[in-house]
Image: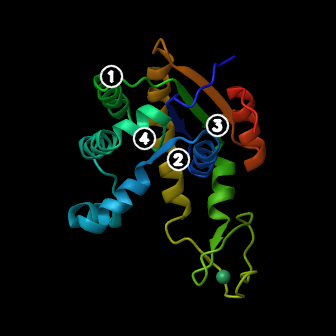
């Protein structure tokens, strides 16, 4: 059983389509945590920084050093709130180097990482979820269908014909998934060997509510 306080600090890991962003936001809401999403930080920065903008638009990832610099800046800017409320890291660390960098940053600021969630999902389900995802380019509603659905579908809100997300093609997804697996394996091993960190493995094949129930049960909190 985990003694739960609002001052725990979390990392959440999961492959594309695992819904880790959604689960992270639920935790933020229920535990009143600070929320650090690398994706969101990058998008914010891309608005003011053309170098970062061009990297993101070309589909490349930022380097470990670039990411770590951003994370360090965010943590230092929000140190009082992080210490007061706790924080969840979503999309970071992705690599062993980033995990080591995060440990150093947190150690220097006397912040302890306590809990690492790993949401497990198979490639097949990841593909069904992401390739079956359709987004309305008029009102931004998102719909999920099995990948095999080929007919055009109309938005239930505005009746516009739905399109598939352009970046969600089969090969790109497979590659993203494989990179995630390879990098995360090492990050998981790193955290497994860390003495004070509790690893919580979550079955991501279930639906959003069930996944959150698992997380909840494992955290032993009542919502
Ligand atoms: Zn619509």
Relative image position of residue 120 (x, y in whole percent): 64, 37
Of mark 4 and mark 3, the one earlier in the sequence is: 4
Q: Earlier in the sequence, mark 2 or mark 3?
A: 3
> Can residue 93 be seen?
no
Corner quadrant of residue 127: bottom right
Q: Given the current orientation, which residue lies at the most extreme top position? A: 195
193 w.r.t. 223: above or below = above
Q: How is the image coloured?
A: rainbow
**Which mark is nearer the camera, 2 or 1?**
1
**Contact (CB < 8 A) between labels 2 and 1?**
no
In this rendering, the answer to whether 59 lies above or below 213 is below
Characterize the local packing of mark 4: few (<14), some (14-19) or many (20 or more) Cα atoms within 10 angstroms.
Answer: many
Counting from the top left corner in percent of width and height, residue 84 is at 45, 33
Q: Earlier in the sequence, mark 2 or mark 1?
A: 1
Residue wearing tag 3: 120
Mark 3 or 1 closer to N-term? 1
Q: CA distance from mark 2 to mark 4?
A: 16 Å
Residue position for label 2: 177
Look at the numbered discs 4 and 3 and tell me whether their residues touch, using CB distance below 8 Å: no
Tell me the distance, in whole angstroms, between the alpha carbons under discs 4 and 1: 16 Å
Disc 2 or disc 4, which is closer to the eye? 4
Dot 2: within a 10 Å radius of its alpha carbon, few (fewer than 14), some, or many (20 or more) residues? Answer: many
Q: Nearer the viewer, residue 111 or 116?
A: 111
Quadrant (top left, top right, bottom left, bottom right) of the N terminus = top right
Q: Nearest the camera: 142 or 28?
A: 28
- Mark 4 or mark 3, which is nearer to you? 4
Q: Position of residue 19 (x, y in %)?
A: 63, 50
């Amino acid at each position: 059983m985990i003694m739960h306080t609002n001052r725990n600090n979390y990392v959440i890991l999961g492959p594309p389509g695992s819904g880790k962003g959604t689960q992270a936001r639920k935790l933020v809401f229920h535990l009143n945590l600070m929320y650090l999403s690398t994706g969101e930080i990058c998008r914010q920065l891309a608005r003011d920084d053309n170098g970062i903008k061009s990297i993101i638009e070309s589909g490349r990832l930022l380097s470990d050093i670039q990411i770590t610099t951003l994370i360090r800046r965010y943590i230092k800017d929000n140190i009082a709130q992080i210490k007061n409320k706790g924080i969840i890291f979503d999309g970071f660390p992705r690599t062993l180097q980033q995990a080591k960098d995060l440990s150093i940053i947190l150690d220097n600021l006397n912040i302890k990482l306590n809990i690492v969630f790993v949401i497990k999902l198979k490639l097949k389900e990841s593909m069904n979820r992401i390739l079956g995802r359709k987004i309305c380019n008029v009102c931004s509603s998102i719909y999920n269908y099995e990948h095999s659905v080929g007919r055009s579908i109309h938005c239930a809100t505005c009746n516009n014909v739905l399109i598939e997300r352009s970046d969600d093609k089969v090969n790109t997804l497979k590659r993203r998934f494989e990179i995630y697996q390879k990098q995360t394996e090492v990050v998981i091993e790193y955290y497994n060997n860390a003495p004070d960190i509790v690893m919580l493995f979550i079955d991501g094949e279930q639906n959003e509510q069930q996944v959150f129930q698992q997380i909840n049960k494992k955290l032993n909190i009542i919502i």
